[in-house]
Amino acid sequence: MLATRDSQGQVLVDELRLEARALRAVDRPLSQASTLPGRLFSDPRIYGREQRRLFRGAWHCIGRAEEIPKGSDRVVDIAHSAVAIMRRPDGTFEARRAADGSVRVENWRGFLFVNLNPRARRLDGYLGAFVARAAPYPLERLRLAHRVVYDIAANWKLVEQNANECYHCPGVHPQLVRLTPYRSGEEDLKDGPVFGGWMEFVRGVETLTPSGKTRRATFPGLSAADRRRVYYYVLYPGNFLSLLPDYVTLDWFIPQGPERTRLVFDLYVDREEPDPADDAMAFWDTTNRQDWRICELAHLGSKAKAYRQGRYSGEEELVHALDRYYVRRMGFLRPAR
């Protein structure tokens, strides 16, 4: 049964009552589950609830610490709140928003994370097992090589779902599947709030570039297995972090409303690396734009009168895990007795 009121006391059940059964269907095992109801991708009341229940209490990675020099500040938008990040002369950080003061900020291996909830659990608790997964990579040594900002006419959940399955890859990303077969790899984090796993390169491929080769040095200390893989992880709900043998990418999902998403895409290399990684950025700009196009089409489809919930492919395990986590965190399902 749907929760009838959110933390602000707003009644949600009146027009959503018909979706109670549909939402329970999302929470079934993968082979029996149904996808999210289409209305969840464009209803402004649902969007407002997402901002309150998901985004305002989550950790958001906003880029690198070195982007804010000592004694300066930067303003970022998190859940429609302007947050000022200040770096003191001693190098430590403070974050505040005008509405109600105190905001949590942590520096994790050179990445800055912000949480609007001053009582939020520590960042390392949120990251969980991902801390060990990322340990071999020299994240402290990264520098920003490229930043591209995309404006996507689609709900943020569709963009995030897209990043977590490669079922669509053969028909959409021919340059990607020749380097990493879409059925390769494995998902190893599936319970949230961090989701993801890895895909494997075909023989002879060194990284993800148009040629599959790289002019950059491989990060030192990586295992033979890590040199043959690309790792993809959602830091739910706001980020997507990818670890490759010679560079790292970060997506920051910034919902602008129920039907638009701004996405900041960063590409990082080792701070001593002279190569500008233009080849890697060219590869991802092509891949990203292919993805945004199908996300926008999927968003239009979700609004069609003919839209019906479907079933997940067996290759959409992570999408199902994300959706299941979503309906639970949104409070749409009563806790099990």
Image (cartoon, rainbow, N blue to C red):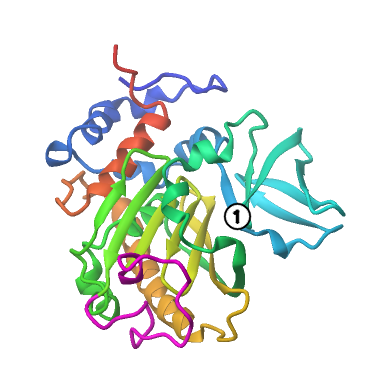
Identify the image quadrant of the N terminus: top left
Q: Residue at x 29, y 76 (%)?
A: 176
173 relative to 97, above or below: below
Q: Secondary structure at mark 1?
A: loop
In terms of image quadrants, where is residue 218?
bottom left
Q: Is residue 293 above or below residue 154?
A: below
Q: Which residues are magenta?
A: 202-228
Please report the residue visible at 61 percent of the width from the left and 67 percent of the height from the top.
141
User: What amino acid is labelled 1 in the image?
Assistant: Arg
- Residue 68, relative to residue 54: is it above or below? below
Depth check: give the residue in front, 272 or 178. Answer: 272
* Residue 267, horizontal then vertical, whole percent: 53, 71
Please tell me which residue is depicted at 50% across the width and 38% down the height of the picture: 126
- The number of numbered discs placed on residues in the rendered structure image is 1
* Residue receiving disc 1: 109
**Quarter of image, res 175:** bottom left
The residue sitting at 41% across, 66% down in the picture is 222
Question: Residue 102: where, in percent of width, then height?
Answer: 75, 34
Horizontally, residue 162 falls left or right of residue 26, namely right
Magenta segment's dominant SS is loop
Tell me the crowding category of disc 1: few under 14, some 14 to 19, or many 20 or more residues within 10 angstroms, Cα based.
some
Q: Is residue 241 magenta?
A: no
Quadrant location, the C terminus: top left
How far across and down, in percent of the image, does residue 188 sit?
A: 29, 48
Left/right placement of residue 272 relative to residue 69 reads left
